[in-house]
Structure formats: C-alpha cells, structure tokens
Amino acid sequence: MAERWNRARVLSLAPDTSSRQAAQSLAAVRSWPLTGAAEGGALWGECLGRASTPYRTAVDLSGPAYQCSCPSRKLPCKHALALLLLWSDGSITTDGDPPEWAEEWFASRPARAGDDGDQKAPADPAAALRRAEQREARVAAGLAELDRWLCDQVRQGLAASQRSGYRLWDDIASRMVDAQAPGLAERLRALAAVPHSGPGWEGRLLEEYALLRLLVTAYGDRVKLPPELRDTVRSRIGFTVRQAEVLASAAPVRDHWHVLARRDLDQERIRTRRTWLRGRRTGRFALVLSFAAIGQSLDDSLTVGTVVDANLAFYPVAVPLRAVVAARHDTLPAGAPPGISTAALLAGYAAALGQDPWLDNWPAVLEATPARAPLPCLFDTVGAAVPLHPGAGECWPLFAMSGGRPLTVAGEWTPRGLWPLTAWDHDGMAVGPVPL
Amino acid sequence: MSTWRDLVTASLIGTERAEVPPAPVPGVLTSDPARATQDPAAVLLDRAALLTAARRAGRRHGQADPPPVAEPDSRPVVSQAAGRRLARMLGGEYPELLAEWLAAAAARGLRPPPELLPALLDRIRRAGPADSSLSRLAAEAGGPRARWLAGLNPDWELITAQHLPADDAWRLGRTAQRRGYLASLRARDPGAARELIAGSWESAGPDERVMFVRVMADGPSLADEPLLEAALDDETAWVRKMAADVLAVLPGSALARRMTERAVRCLRIERGPRGTRLVVTPPAESDALMRRDGIAPGAAGASSPADRARLMLEVVARTPLRTWTDEFGLGAAQIVTLSSGDWAPVLFTAWSRAAIAQRDKDWMAVLLHQALTGWTWRPPGLAAEFEALRQLARRADPAVLSDPGPDAPQVIREATRLLRFRYDILRELDDHDGGD
C-alpha cells in the first residue's frame, strides 16, 4: 500500500472550498457501508447519499485519478475526497478484492500504462512467467468463445443485429474484458454503432466480423507468424508492451517531427489523444498516444503545426506507427508539411495493409481541394478524389479555408474516407484541431 | 464488386438458410481442402476477410466536381488573439457583442479567420431576419469568402443575398423583407421612403405601422417629425410608445422641447454655502399630455412617492442631455458628481437611459466612470440602476475601464468584466500586425 497521505495533502486536492467542506462532513464511517483498499494504491467505497443507490467511488492514488458515479463534474468530487480522508485517518483496511465495478475501472486505467516508465522489472520472474502463461490461456479461451459468437452471428444472419440493442456487443465485449483481451473488447463495443451508421452498414459489420475472425485465426497460428506480425496480432488483441521495453528494445529514431494532427476520443471512462507526426528527414509517420480519465486534461506537449526535434521509440509491430517520445530536444515553428497526391495516399495505405490487414487508421497529408459533389471529398491537382468521412460532418470550416483553392490537409484515412484534422491556410498557418 | 455484395447478402440472411458464395480474389489461392468440412459461417467470414483486405488495398480514387473559386480578399486576417476571441463569442460568450466585433474588424479593413465563417453564418441564420443589421455586418466583414461559402449552402444564401428585386420585396414580401426594402430605400432616398410610409399608413395594420416607426428610428430627421407626431395619436399603444421614443431622441423636435420644459421644472441646481447640489421636485402626477408623449401613468393611486419618482425618471430619461449642460453651465463629468441625496439612483438611471437613447458618448463614459469608481460611497441599489449599468458597459467607450477592486458589488464586477472584454476586442483588432 502506498504511504498514507496526511489530511492536509488530501484537502489540498479539493477543487474549491465548498467541496472541501462537503467532503469533511461526508468522511464518516457510517456514510460508507463499503470501503476497501488494495496494494498498489487503489481505494474504493460506496457512499450513501440522497440517491436510491449508493454512489460508487474509486481512487487510484498513483495519478491520483478519481472515478465516481455521482453527477458532480468537480474533480475530485466530494465523495472521492471523503474516501481519501477516511483512508488518511486509517478508517479503511487494506485487504480484500475490489468489487467488480472498481476492478473494471482500475483495470482500464491507462495512467498505469503511462506510469510504465517508472515501473521496475517484476520482482519474481517465475511468478511473472506463470501469470503470463495464465493470461495466454485465458485469452485463448476467450478467442475460442469469440469465434463461436462470430460464427453464430453469421449463421443466424446479420439482419437480426439491427434490431438487437447495444447489449449484443456489450456482452461479448465484457467477456473479452474477462478474458483479458481489452483490444478486442474495444473493437466489439464500437460495433454497436455500425447498424445505425447509414446505408451499407451490413457490409461494414461483415468487414469487422471478418477481421475479428482473422485475428482469432492469426492468434491460433501465432507460432507460425513472423515476429512483427505476431506482435501486431497480440497488440490488436490487447497485450500491452511496457514503455520501458519499447525504449529498451529499439534504437530511437531522431528526426525533426512535424506535428501533423491530433484527435481526441472520449470512450466510457477514458479520453485518448492520438497525435500524428511525420519525420522531415526520414519521412516516417508516427503516432503518439496519451490517455486521461474523463474530466482530466490530456498531454498537451505536442503542438499541432510545430516541429519537434525528438527521439522516438517505435513499438515493434509489422507497421510501426505507435511510438513514445524517448527524448525531446527542441520545438521549432513550422509551415505546412509537404502534401502528397491521392494516388500516393492510396498506394501507401495498400502497402501498409499488406503488413497489417487490421490497419484502419492511416495518416494522410494531402495537397488537395475540398469539393461537395458528387459527395463531400478532397481532390488533388490531377483531379483524383477521395471521400471525406461521413462522420466528420459537413467540414464547412475546411471549405471556408480553401475558398475553392488547394490547401494542405492532414487527417486520418479510413475505409470510410478521410477524417480531416488539420488544414494549413494559404499562409502556412495550421488550423486544427477545431472540427474541420 | 458483385462478389462482395453476394457475400454480404448471404451474411444478412445467415448461412443457416443461404449458400456461401465463392469469393475469388485474383492471384490468391483460396480453396483450402482441409477446410472443406468447416462451418459455412466460418468459411464465409474467412472469405470476407480476404475480400475486405483486397478491397481496402485495391481502392481506386473517385472524381469530383470542382467548386467555383472564391474572389480574392485583399484585407488581412485579424490577429490570432482576435480570432480566438471571435471563436469564443460564437461559442456563446458575450454573444451580444458580436456586432461590435464585426463592425470594428470591418472598420479596420480586416477580415475574420475563414475557418470561423461557417459558425458565424450559422449564428446569423439562427438570429433570423429580425437582426438584419447583424446580417449586414457579417456580410461586410466576411467579404467575398463569406459570399462564396453562402453560395455552397442554401441555409446561408439569404444572409449574403441582401438585394431582393425591389418592387417584389415591397409588394409581395413578408414584413421583414418589406422592412429591408424600406430601410434600403430610406438610405438611398429618404424623401421617397417617407412618401411611401405616408401613403401606406392608412391601410397598414398595427405590425406594419410599428415597422414604419422602427425604420424611421434609424437616423430620424426633422422631416420625419410630422409623421411621428401624428403617430403619437395612433390607436395602437405600441406605435404611440415607439413614436414617442424616436421623437425624444430627435434633436429639436417639439416633443423634446415639451420634455425639456417639464424636466427643468423638476431639477434645478442650488449653489449654497455648503456646496453645490441638485434639488429635485418630481412631477405631481401624469397628465394627458405626458401620456401622449410616451410617459405611461402608474398604477392606481398615482401620486404615491414611488410613482412620482418613476415619473421623474421617465421625464429626465427623455430629455435631451444638452439641457443640463446648458442649464447648469457645467460639463457632464461635473454634473454627475453633484450631490442629489436620495435621488442619486433615479438620476443615474434616467441619465443613463437618455445617454444610451441619444447615443451620447460623453455622457455614457462619465456615467459609467462615475459608477465604477464611485461605488464605495454610493453602491448601486435599484434594479433599474443595475440594468442601466449593464447597458452602459455594453455601449460606452471601453477606455473608461478601471479596476474596481475585488470587494466591489457583483454588478460592478460584471460590468467591468464586460467592459474589459470589449476593451480586449478593440486592442486585439488594433494589434493585427503583431500577431502573437
């Protein structure tokens, strides 16, 4: 258990005076029928309030990060503060396993992945190996279940899925969480939106099911796969590689990295920021991920439109995009990055798919003009067009910046089209990530 | 293509009832004898996976209908700070100051960042035709790029298309269009507009007559007086009130003279041994002539002290401010600091309303300065005074900005915040070369 914090340290976390006062009056054992704490700095508890069900509160001391089912938008809320106060004065015992709701949140805490750099190698190699074997066995069992489920869907016909609620995917996703395959769980949860994504949904659903089964098959055959492809499969399933390992395994690439674009995604409890970079010298694309709990702010150190002189260490997969910043030397101002043609974009994506058929987000920097007909699209200097992603909306700001003339656009190329994220105006000034 | 459709159709129906169609991919060997006995659902998914990868990698570009090219706009874009402020205003912060921003940008020969034009046009569209001046300002500030953009989206067409075919707009248009026509005619040829109003007055309904008076409210002249004076006897109360408001701010009008006569009977200056002070004798009661001039009678029991104070306020609010500088031989800045005892809030409110209605910059500035610096010895008290203060902060020259200190009443702090916002608007627009 982490070293106990004193009362003053806890109270200093309060966002304002009123939460400080409210927390102090809530920090009474009788208001908390359930509390607990775990090794490694996790607290949880259920607090009786005016609502019919108790509020469920969890704190990860390593952030610290907070999670509470109450409607307050303050962070930490009074319940999280009260829980910390109880722990601070020794009213919470360190034993027992967290209840499922807390466990799930702790498991999903990406900050732990972010803390990897500081973590030391496992103390007991034999125990670590045993845990790793257990996990492989669980994943294998989970994938077998997923395979049966996928085949069931296709056997019964996808027509039924438009009528079934999100539970259909949520249930199988939760089972993948249990099977320690969070990457699959995330892919499955995202599928609930597909039947309502407009014409062609059935084709898109089939694509996703087919690619999921391809992952199952590939994992089954993993001993026969080349190491990079095996790592790709494992990472898509949800095996994480610790940052320390990434930093240790590969020589970092130093370059002047143009910060092209970024996209923030809010999932259930996690905000993910994807930042796309491209090296000026190497021409390599890189993707830096950062995570935060809902309500907390994301890492803002890579500013779109600048150039960062840095060493990046790439995760060892078949198409190495994801990277961590190993060392940073300087940040420089920059104009627009060089854009490419539509044909070059499609060719680059095709080549990458040859290495990783699950790749559905590919960085794009185009020199192109937006047009509205026959569909919202971007066309390059020879008139070759790619559609804009329907989910990106009308993209009016992009049109307004263009005025019918070509500009440099960076974004994510996906099977449904290009999701624009940054545009450079005719003076080379980057605009983004406003919705384009 | 049809191969993929066949697979999708089979998956929709389900392999329980549908045959799995073959799905050859040129150059790829798909028949795997070992799998011949496999679950048809699995076979379908495997074929779909292969085709998905092939289709994604083999995607061809499309064609676009290039949009027209916008006319160039030689005006520079505002500074980044000014652009960020405009974005905040379009996002809902101080939306009432948008017109001021647009007018100030246009006056400095600057244009808004193009990526904000869609939000600006949306905002104007939501404000509706009632706010035609905002729409005119947006069209002017937005320039050719805004016109180009509006050409791409029918929702925005009306905003920039100010010029309706003249006669049609007058004969067939709705009130808003008729008003637009009349206002533009008045700008070109005030005499013709006046004749048109005079000729249409008899047959016009109440809404239409209100509209006529509104049009005349924009820069009234003594030539409009006969029409407006006649409107004081209109059968509709709203028309009478509007006409009285316009005449009160028309320099040299008979109504303004009548109001002046009343006002000087109510307020005089007394220079005594203990200093100079203002002595107030409020009107005893409202008479028919006062009512005709737009001062409504109070509730029953009309000569109560509260009612007399209200009459006093109404009379002074409609009196030309020059009356006081002429009558007392003092400047506005001196007059507002004269002691008037309990009448101070009434006089402050009345003069503020007069300054706003008469668009008198000097009076607005001295009144606001007085309120922001003098709250320690006379904090604002009346609700009407609060409102007057807010209106002054919205219109007075923001150069009177001063720091009222953290202990100031909320209404003073809010007014200061508003004033600071306006001050920053102008500062950022003046700073367009410096960027940031």
Image (cartoon, helix red, strand yellow):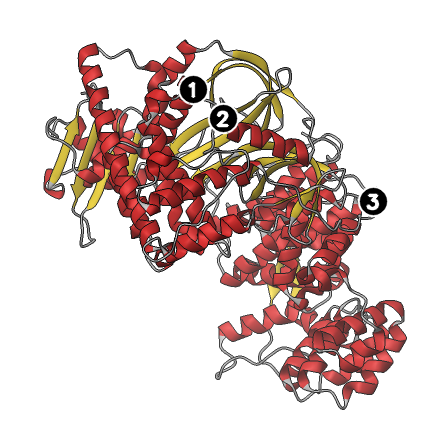
Q: Nearer the viewer, residue B111 or B388?
A: B111
C-alpha gap between disc 3 and disc 1: 51 Å
Indicate which disc, 1 or 2, sits on the residue closer to the N terminus: 1
Give x and y (percent) for residue A381.
Answer: 76, 37
Please give the chain letter of the residue carrying mark 2: A
Q: Are marks 3 and 2 in contact (CB under 8 Å)?
A: no
On the image, numbered disc 2 is attached to which residue? A355
C-alpha gap between disc 3 and disc 2: 46 Å
On the image, numbered disc 1 is attached to which residue? A228
The amino acid type found where label 1 is placed reads Glu
Under circle 3, the secondary element is: loop
Q: Nearer the viewer, residue B153 or B206?
A: B153
Q: Quadrant of the C terminus of chain A?
A: top right
Quarter of the image for residue B329 reads bottom right
Quarter of the image for residue A284 reads top right
Under circle 1, the secondary element is: helix
Please determine if labels 3 and 1 lie on a single subunit: no
How packed mark 2 is, by other alpha carbons closer than 10 Å (few <14, some 14-19, many 20 or more), is some
Please determine if labels 1 and 2 lie on a single subunit: yes
On the image, numbered disc 3 is attached to which residue? B72
> With B362 as the anchor, is A247 left or right in this view?
left
Q: Nearer the viewer, residue A134 or B362?
A: A134
Q: Quadrant of the N terminus of chain A?
A: top left
